[in-house]
Image (spheres, rainbow, N blue to C red):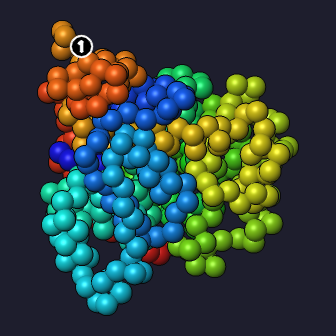
Amino acid sequence: MNQLLSIDDLSVDDVERLMELSTSFAEVLRRSVPKVPALRGKTVIMAFFEDSTRTRSSFDLAARRLSADVATFAAGASSLSKGESIRDTVETISAMGVDALVVRHPHPGVPAAISRYTTAAVVNAGDGRHQHPTQALLDLYTLRTTIGDIAGKRVLLCGDILNSRVARSNVALFTKMGAEVLVCGPHTLLPPHSSTEMFGDPVQVVRSIDSVIGSIDVAYMLRIQNERIADAALPSIREYRTMYGLTVDRAAKMASHAVVMHPGPINRGVEIDADVADSEASLITAQVAAGVSVRMAVMYQLLGPGQFRDVSGDFDPDAVSNPGQRAPDGDAATGDGPVLDSTQTLNLTEPTAATPVQETAS
């Protein structure tokens, strides 16, 4: 397949391969010239129908670090504002010879719909409150590089679970990789599922953050999705912070090895205190940094010549870190041309069309 729409598109083996590639690309980014010619000649369109700073900048940098040509699609300045359908817009863009579309949209299921109208690779950069797969992947990578394997670790997601695409993707990925996932938040901001399953994955719902704060390995705080909820679904900001915020006092009760995460943007003094967000336990900056190498890995898997391998055919992520190695028809000095001859590809399973989530807070 040539798309990443949901964590469900990935097997455990797929995730492991992406983690290996991310590690190699992270090494590339530490060089004086943080760039490889892996996607030279490819064109990537950033189609963001919803505001974004971290995700769009991260994808843009990732594509450029792989030497792809990058263009930005401005929805407000396009024919969409004249009544053109998304299908016609996508088919028009595709006819220009685009290799990949990175799509963010406020409505669930739009990236999946777009993937049916184009032969270009489609990456879901967040669709409403449905999915945000690359955020989950970069969160996993951040944890792998700090606390190691998350299998058996207790991960608490706290906040607006109902409206969070990050929560959906992270629950799916963390449980897939063997973590014990707990969720906590106001009952009006939790999905109307049982206490043992959420978004189709096993979770434990806890009513009080204080009841588990001392036993978790990861505190993953989520912001209130003001743009997606009704006022009645949320207690006052002061009450919310008192009941669910990661305050300095609560953070002091966490285990010494425990870490703090947040996908951003942060509402300091609401879901997390400023001193906690800036503490040594915080991985928030590391999450942002991981975004570029992880998204490089995703785009390489979708657009590159395939998995790097050594002469025996085994996976060789180190090849990414040596772009100057002579490749067939390539230049050893500059790294021009194919990085390595390879035939292996990432096996992404056929995704199903996303089922829009009812936009009600219950």
Q: Is residue 245 above or below residue 77?
A: above
- Would you identify the image quadrant in which residue 32 lies? top right
- Would you identify the image quadrant in which residue 46 lies? bottom left
Identify the residue at the far bottom of this view. 82
Q: Nearer the viewer, residue 97 or 75?
A: 97
**Number of callouts:** 1
Q: Nearer the viewer, residue 220 or 95?
A: 95
Answer with left or right where residue 346 lies relative to residue 245: left
Q: Position of residue 274 (x, y in %)?
A: 80, 50
- Would you identify the image quadrant in which residue 124 lies? bottom left
Provide the secondary structure element on which disc 1 rests: loop
> On the rendered image, what quadrant is the N terminus found in?
top left
Q: Position of residue 335 (x, y in %)?
A: 32, 27
Q: Nearer the viewer, residue 79 or 351?
A: 79
Report the residue at 65% width, 37% height from top: 283
Report the residue at 25% width, 85% height from top: 84
Q: Position of residue 278 (x, y in %)?
A: 77, 43
Report the residue at 47% width, 75% height from top: 360
Answer with left or right where residue 323 lies relative to residue 211: left
Q: Position of residue 257 (x, y in %)?
A: 70, 25
Amino acid beneath label 1: Asp
Note whether residue 134 is visible: no
Report the residue at 36% width, 42% height from top: 67
Packing grade of label 1 (10 A; few <14, some 14-19, many >=20) is some
Answer with left or right where residue 129 lies relative to residue 240: left
Q: Is residue 111 above or below residue 247?
A: below
Identify the residue at the far right of this view. 249
Q: Which residue is mark 1?
A: 310
